[in-house]
Amino acid sequence: MTTNLRVIPLGGLGEIGRNMMLIEYGEDIIVVDVGLMFPEEEMLGVDLVIPDFSYLRDNKEKLRAVFLTHGHEDHVGALPYFLREFNAPIYGAKLTDGLIRVKLQEHRLLQGVETHVVTSGEVIKAGVFEVEFFPVAHSIPDACGLIIRTPLGLIVHTGDFKLDHTPVMDQHTDLIRLAQVGAEGCLLLLADSTYAEQEGYTPSEQLVGEALRNILVNAPGRVIVATFASLISRVQQVIDAAVFTKRKVFVTGRSMIDNVAMARQLGYLNAPEGTIVGVEEMRNTPLSKLVIVTTGSQGEPTSALTRMANGDHRHIQIVEGDTVVLSASPIPGNETAVYRNVDNLFRLGADVLYNRVSNIHVRGHASREELKIIQGLLQPEYFVPVHGEYRHLVVHAKLAEAVGVPKGNAFVLTDGDVLEIDEESAWTAERVPASYVYIDGLGIGDVDQHILRDRAHLSTDGVVVVMVAVDKSTGKLERAPEVLARGFVDVGGQEDLLERSKSVAAKALEGASHYTEFTDVNSRIKDAVSKFLYDETRRRPMVLTVTVEV
Ligand SMILES: [Zn+2]
Ligand SMILES: [Zn+2]
């Protein structure tokens, strides 16, 4: 049994997304966040990427609790997949809890899951750990950081945060509590690195509110605002601007409708009576008196905005005079889909305001001066930058050492690295599995690198199908193989190439006296034809064989 403290990031260190961290001591493990990542463009046909749970799977009996810092997808999105395998109480602030309950309901997983609403300052015991939530300013209400009391000292995890002095809904980062922790002594700080390259201070969310209001004042017609369904504070800003300009608000997109209903019920969205309207009333309202809040800021194929851009939304047809606001930067990997929507919306006559042309999405993360303030208040003995691509982590670690973290005590970890801490020192120990787990449709992890490679081949190099009929008892060819190609080298001489691959396939079976295994026949043909086509064309089409025994 180990009595060192072990900090194990399973995601979010080295990429933006799928945040998940384990903190282990002796017989206890707690989990901070279970997020997902949207796939990069080369991950063809994959819907989502989630953390690798292998290490936790091997240490299932140590799992005590899950703590969620806030309700963004990159922090809670993988919970439905996690909960199919693991059972542990889940703690989060009120809105976070509301958002995950909506999500679990969608996945029909709410039954049998134990979720708890936590308030700031409350302390939850989980094994040897005691965990306290403290409020932070971020682009969603109820965002929290964690103060984790361990047998070796205090860990502070900032979650996603910034130091906004005029935050929406008035939630400030609790610097006073952090100063107290600093005075007591902070063993380890884990802090948000997303904007560690950004000089100065991150602008206030208030700027977004002002920008939205200006857009609504100046737009000649209807305004359509697309954002994340979980960005509740952005929705509030739209409602405020709508009230200011005497416009009605119509909400569309399944997850947006559900989240808005939940947030209104919990009191996180305030709209004067009659501001939010249904379909009938929307139809009877002049376009210049309307704002539409929708999903689809990431170009998701089935989202409401994409349907509008394609002209097949049930209730909303884009017309000249519409203004569409994309109030969320495209997550890397989604750009193509996002800009396809932008193009289509322009084609339909709308004016489109997106991140490249208008400052309408303020960042929810702390810039360098803010990060220095946190370091100054906590003066941690050890530091691990979290939530960032590799360069963000490195830059943040350097910043920490520049403002007081002892040299060599800032550790740049990436997913799967284990940091061990004992009474005297800290070091990186072994690695645990932390590969990308792909979610494709409904399955978990049934897509691996091979499948992705196949899909890449299909999309760039096409597919070649070789059909052979072999004698059941001898394995000899019954007749000449047939070869078909789709999406493969559409150049002159292709006929000839396919003709020649027939004889390559035939040759591959030469000398065969008796094949009983289909797989043997298949792989002989596949190898020979693949090699031949590569030699001839430098392409690697996917080669499929269809063998018929006669
Ligand atoms: Zn966030
Ligand atoms: Zn985040």
Image: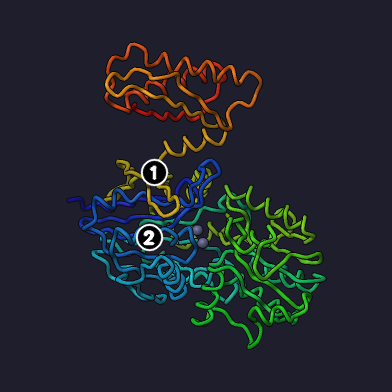
Q: Earlier in the sequence, mark 1 or mark 2?
A: 2
Q: Quick check: is the Cβ at mark 2 less than 8 Å away from ligand 2?
A: no
Q: Nearer the viewer, residue 301 or 76?
A: 301
Amino acid under disc 1: Ser
Q: Which of 499 and 271 is in front in this view?
A: 499
Element carrying mark 1: loop
Residue furthest top as drawn: 511
Q: Residue at x 28, y 64 (%)?
A: 87
Judge left or right: residue 500 versus residue 63: right
From this viewpoint, is residue 134 visible? yes
- Work out which quarter of the rendered image holds the C terminus and state it: top left
The x and y percentages for residue 178 are 44, 67
Q: Which of 419 and 473 is in front in this view?
A: 473
Residue furthest left as drawn: 1
The x and y percentages for residue 28 are 24, 59
Considering only vertical position in the picture, is 473 above or below 53? Answer: above
Amino acid under disc 2: Val
Tell me the quarter of the picture where residue 129 sits.
bottom left
| Total marks placed | 2
Depth check, mark 1 against mark 2: the one in front is 1
The x and y percentages for residue 12 are 45, 51
Q: Specify the label residue 15 is tagged with.
A: none
Judge left or right: residue 487 versus residue 107: right
Considering only vertical position in the picture, is 106 above or below 384? Answer: below
Considering only vertical position in the picture, is 119 above or below 186? Answer: below
Q: Residue at x 28, y 26 (%)?
A: 517
Q: Name the residue under label 2.
A: 32
Q: Name the residue under label 1.
A: 435
Q: Which residue is drawn at 49% across and 63% down?
A: 72
Considering only vertical position in the picture, is 499 above or below 456? Answer: above
Residue furthest bottom as drawn: 273
